[in-house]
Image (cartoon, rainbow, N blue to C red):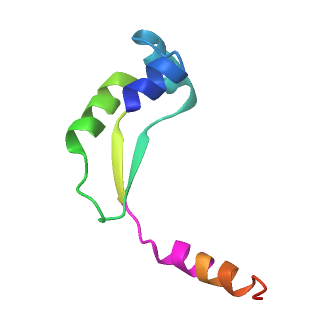
Amino acid sequence: MWRQVFQGTLGLLGGTAQDFMKEMHTRLVYLDTELVPVPEKELAEISEYCGLPMERMKVSLEPLLASLIKAASQVPHE
């Protein structure tokens, strides 16, 4: 899937991907919600392809849930 995005959609092939990504970014960040296993192999492939280090950050979904509950409470009910 990531290859389709980088190569097919963005047209970033080979060294072009690394040049572009390094010009715009210093690292890649994977947000780990702990809901699914971390796709270690894919993350390593993306990191190598982009030429950037991969950082894994554990995050909670509680702020998202709180925002959804707040938004739902503001919707008028018929």
Magenta span: chief secondary structure: helix
**Residue 26 x %, y %:** 47, 35
Q: Is residue 68 left or right of residue 17?
A: right
Look at the image and tell me in which quarter the C terminus lies: bottom right
Residue segment shown in magenta: 58-67
**Residue 22 x %, y %:** 49, 25
Question: In this picture, is 14 found above or below 66?
Answer: above
Does residue 51 appear in the picture of this structure?
no
What residue is drawn where x is 69% and y is 87%? 73
Along the line of sight, which residue is nearer the eye, 57 or 63? 63
What residue is drawn where x is 42% and y is 25%? 4
Question: In this picture, is 78 found above or below 56?
Answer: below
Does residue 61 appear in the picture of this structure?
yes
The quadrant holding residue 28 is top left
Q: Is residue 60 magenta?
A: yes
What residue is drawn where x is 22% and y is 44%? 40
So how many labels did they put on this image? 0
